[in-house]
Image: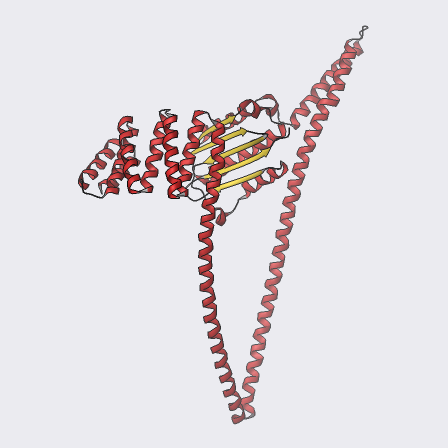
Amino acid sequence: MHYNLGKISFENKDWRAAKRYFTVSDSLLGTSGNIKQKLANTLALGKVAVQQYENDTAFGYFKEVLDVSLANQFYDLYTEAVLEYGQLNINLKNYDVAEMTLAMAYTNAIQWNRLELQKKIINSLRKTYSAKGDYENAYNLMTQLNAVSESISRQQNSKAIQEIEVKYQSLQKENQIYELKEEKLAKQAEIERQKTIKKAFLYGFLVLLIPIISLLYVYYQKLQAQSKLNQQEKELSSQKITSLLHTQELELARTSLEAQREERHRIAKQLHDSIGGNLAGIKLQLANVKESSKNQKTIIKQVNETYELVRDISHDLVPKKFHQNAFTFLIENYIAQLRDSSELKVNFYAHPKAKVNEIPSKLKVELYQILQELFTNTIKHANAKNVEVHLNILDSELQLLYEDDGRGFAIEKIGKGIGLQNIESRLQQLNSSLMLDSAPKRGTVVTIEIPLKE
């Protein structure tokens, strides 16, 4: 009971009360109490010490839990202690200690063949490298994290397949039972039919009318059932046609939007480069004419006005902010707006920053809109508190890594919503790929890889 009271006090950030309850719980267990519960108390006291900035005390508690839980193979406590120990070192900028501790824990996780433990430790190592500024190792660990996630998914799929096989065998048995019942019913029906025939011969013509009337009634029921079936088939066909038309309309709208975007870029370039250049040349030639007149000044003024109008139109076709500002600045400004309008904590990293700012304008616009779509999904559905965004360029490839700590979801049950479908539609135009990793209560990770033309 004292341990649960301590957890409630910890959640309410009443550190003194939490420490008191955990200490009482530990003393009640004594020296011969439940080892695992005593370790849980020690780990909880370490967390309280971190909140009270008693770092040396916290290190002592975490080290004790690490050693004892490793010896007794308490995987859950060992995992939590490793992550807390590593995070405390990261907070104190002891990156080398954190890296060494997490690496040793990762080795143990491999020996135990605990994939979920491996994934948590790899993720903590990746955050350690990001905090150090070692983005290349952080990127390599992301690849390893994806591999572990795929292994976990395969295990989950294997379990699901086994469950489906069990259900299939159960259905087969139920079908056999149903067939036996059908056979029994058929035999009973045959017996009843024979009895009816015998009664027909016995009772004569009047009794013979009864089965005739019954047959007519059954035929009438069949006609009604067939009529209902035909009506249902018509409604189903109508629904399929409506769905197909809707899909075609969406595809046409998407194609039209892409064509409009390309046409706007082409017109803007022609206005700015061709017509704008010609107007500038005409203005220069008029300015170099020695003999000046009132008409000449009027023409020069009109050329100036036309040149400014052409330039404004070309800038309106392609948003000015993608020409006038660095791309990373635009993203940071957008994230600042999100922080002001919500409680979401967002960390953004770009590496190398100069190369990220030099990508083509069209790609900037697409990436910016993809990020807007991802943040919209997180705010609407994920109930997340923290988001990390990485933009990395390595070996002629741009990688966008988006991770939140929200509620997550089962991909095989819920599927991909309209937001993710819109993102995939944009990525198809860029010959790019998207990887989605999510599960209930463990957040969502979206990885996008875009090839860059040399």
Query: Which quarter of the image is occupied by the C terminus?
Result: top right
Q: Residue at x 26, y 39 (%)?
A: 39
Where's residue 198, x and y in %? Answer: 52, 90
Q: Residue at x 35, y 24 (%)?
A: 92
Rendered position, 56 above or below 204:
above
Where's residue 269, x and y in %? Answer: 70, 26
Rendered position, 179 above or below 250:
below
**Is residue 54 left or right of 182 when viewed as pictured?**
left
Where's residue 168, x and y in %? Answer: 47, 61
Rendered position, 201 above or below 179:
below
Q: Residue at x 49, y 75 (%)?
A: 182
Asked whether residue 424 is in view, the answer is yes
The residue at the far top in this view is: 290
Front-lying residue, 157 or 231: 157
**Is residue 166 left or right of 197 when viewed as pictured?**
left
Determine the image quadrant of residue 397: top right
Determine the image quadrant of residue 68: top left
Asked whether residue 343 is in view, the answer is no
Where's residue 7, x and y in %? Answer: 28, 38
Number of labels in the image equals 0
Front-lying residue, 102 or 373: 102
Query: Which quarter of the image is occupied by the N terminus?
Result: top left
Display colour scheme = secondary structure
**Is residue 345 left or right of 202 when viewed as pictured?**
left
**Is residue 395 left or right of 444 when viewed as pictured?**
right
Determine the image quadrant of residue 93: top left
Front-lying residue, 328 or 335: 328
